[in-house]
Amino acid sequence: MRTEVHVHGNLYLCEGVTRRQVEAALRPWLEYLDVERMDEAKSLEPDQPGIVYHARDGLLEICWTGAVGRTFEQKLEETVQLLGPLTEQAAELELTYYHENGGDETRLIFVGPTPEAIHEAQRRRMVEDVASLLSRHFDEAAVGEVVALVNDLFRREWQSGGREAPAPEPSMPSVPPGRKHLH
């Protein structure tokens, strides 16, 4: 059974990364799509750029929709593992699955140069989401208490793996407006 999925995110790549390296990292996804190069990975939505490497800016822009099957996410995970070492910082890819019954489901996949960078990006995203949700009903001090707890939970989770926890960013994030992509 095939499902439509939208993959969205921007990955900032290390200085000196070449198009050839990017396409080599994208290979599992490109093979899944049965294409040779990233510019052949066209989105089902004509107004979406697909998978575009902006060499001048060191940016891999992904805004792609396609019909996929059960093994798609596995191939995307393989691609993420290969892209991680090429990235300058951790970032997220948002996957939105559109089901035939009209429902949709969102999942995040984090990409980064190191496990520490990915863990920090996950923590930051969780803090943003929790702060956004709570700020609708509670004042900044109350939201700050919960953010401190979230930071502590992430620290403990990291340490339970026998690693020294990365220091969280000190300030509470600004609460972003809605995250829905309107394409």
Image (tube, rainbow, N blue to C red):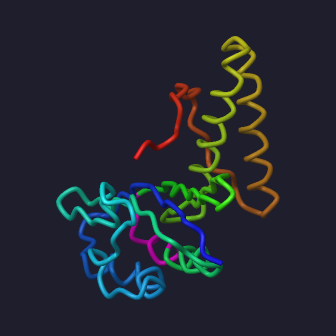
Residue at image point 71% right, 14% down: 141
- Picture layout, residue 136 above or below residue 77: above
Membership of 67 in magenta stretch: no
Relative to 8, 141 lies left or right: right
Residue 61, quarter of picture: bottom left
Residue at image point 58% right, 61% down: 109
Q: Position of residue 117 (x, y in %)?
A: 54, 56
Residue nearest the viewer, comparing 38 with 79 = 38
Relative to 127, 23 lies left or right: left
Membership of 85 in magenta stretch: yes
Total of numbered circles in the picture?
0
Residue nearest the viewer, comparing 8 with 5 = 5
Residue at image point 77% right, 55% down: 159
Relative to 17, 169 lies left or right: right
Q: Position of residue 120 (x, y in %)?
A: 59, 49
Extreme-left residue of the structure: 56
Residue nearest the viewer, comparing 142 with 79 = 79
Q: Position of residue 180 (x, y in %)?
A: 52, 40
- Picture layout, residue 75 above or below residue 88: below
- Picture layout, residue 75 above or below residue 181: below
Q: Position of residue 113 (x, y in %)?
A: 48, 65
Q: Which residues are magenta?
A: 80-88
Extreme-top residue of the structure: 139
**From the image, which quarter does the N terminus lie in?**
bottom right
Residue nearest the viewer, comparing 127 with 105 = 105
- Picture layout, residue 175 above or below residue 78: above
- Assign the magenta stretch its main secondary structure: helix
